[in-house]
Amino acid sequence: MTELEKKRHSLAHLLAAATLKLYPNTKITLGPAVENGFYYDMDFENPISDSDLKKIQKTMKKMANSWTTFEHKKVSPDEAREFFAGNEYKLELIDEIAKNTSAVVLLGELSMRLADACYARHIEVNLVESLDEAVEVAIALCHKHHATTIALSPGGSSYDMFKNYKVRGETFIEICQTYLQA
């Protein structure tokens, strides 16, 4: 992950924190960094206006001065459910991941961090060297587990292996098209 991508990812978290500070009943969902910035999907209790967006931005700026580190914490699905109680979006994601994940394919320099979390949940882990190999292994796992659906995402590719999001996405599309034509 480049320094810019790390900053964007951090800003997405800051956006969620500032929003929850001002509007504590907001339900947050996902907030990734993207090629030209970041976003966070949120469900507000009441509609917001442009003036609310300015308040959120002002709160982000104030909070940014005190944010010096991020804490990464591994939690079980039950702990995650407790933390996000009342947020049906997060609970749905937690349940889907806990229920439907039988195996994962990981690559890149951060793969061992993710692997540890998967091992703790008794999820089969497959470490690979390239995105092409990841697609090949994912297809084999689909057959092994008699699955009719396979979820592949270039976002699961390690950031250290690609120049940027666009290159990663284009590479992923090329690989998938090769398998579809075979």
Image (spheres, grey):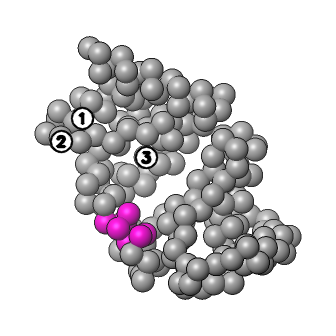
Image quarter (top left, top right, bottom left or bottom right) of the C terminus? top left
* Residue ID for mark 3: 115
Q: Residue at x 33, y 58 (%)?
A: 97
* Residue ID for mark 2: 147
Dot 3: within a 10 Å radius of its alpha carbon, few (fewer than 14), some, or many (20 or more) residues? many
Q: Nearer the viewer, residue 52 or 91?
A: 52
Q: Nearer the viewer, residue 2 or 154?
A: 154
Ranked by sequence position, the earlier of labels 2 and 1 is 1
Compared to residue 167, the image places residue 26 above or below, namely: below
Image position of 143 (left or right of 12): left
Q: Which label sits on residue 141?
A: 1
Q: Amino acid at mark 3?
A: Ala
Kind of element beneath mark 2:
loop
Q: Residue at x 31, y 33 (%)?
A: 138
Q: Amino acid at mark 1?
A: Leu
Dot 2: within a 10 Å radius of its alpha carbon, few (fewer than 14), some, or many (20 or more) residues? few
Please say if the residues under marks 1 and 3 sit with CB atoms less than 8 Å apart. no
Task: Give residue 27's position: percent from left, percent from top.
Answer: 51, 76
Q: Residue at x 24, y 35 (%)?
A: 141
Q: Nearer the viewer, residue 78 or 175?
A: 175
Q: Which stretch did the figure color magenta?
A: 89-95
Kind of element beneath mark 3:
helix
Q: Looking at this rendering, what residue extends furthest in the left direction?
A: 146
* Residue 177 located within the stretch drawn in magenta: no
Kind of element beneath mark 1:
helix
Q: Looking at this rendering, what residue extends furthest in the top direction?
A: 182
Ranked by sequence position, the earlier of labels 1 and 3 is 3
Q: CA distance from mark 2 to mark 1?
A: 8 Å
Task: Give residue 173's position: percent from left, percent from top.
Answer: 45, 26
Q: Which label sits on residue 160?
A: none
Q: Nearer the viewer, residue 121 or 105?
A: 105
Q: Amino acid at mark 2?
A: Ala
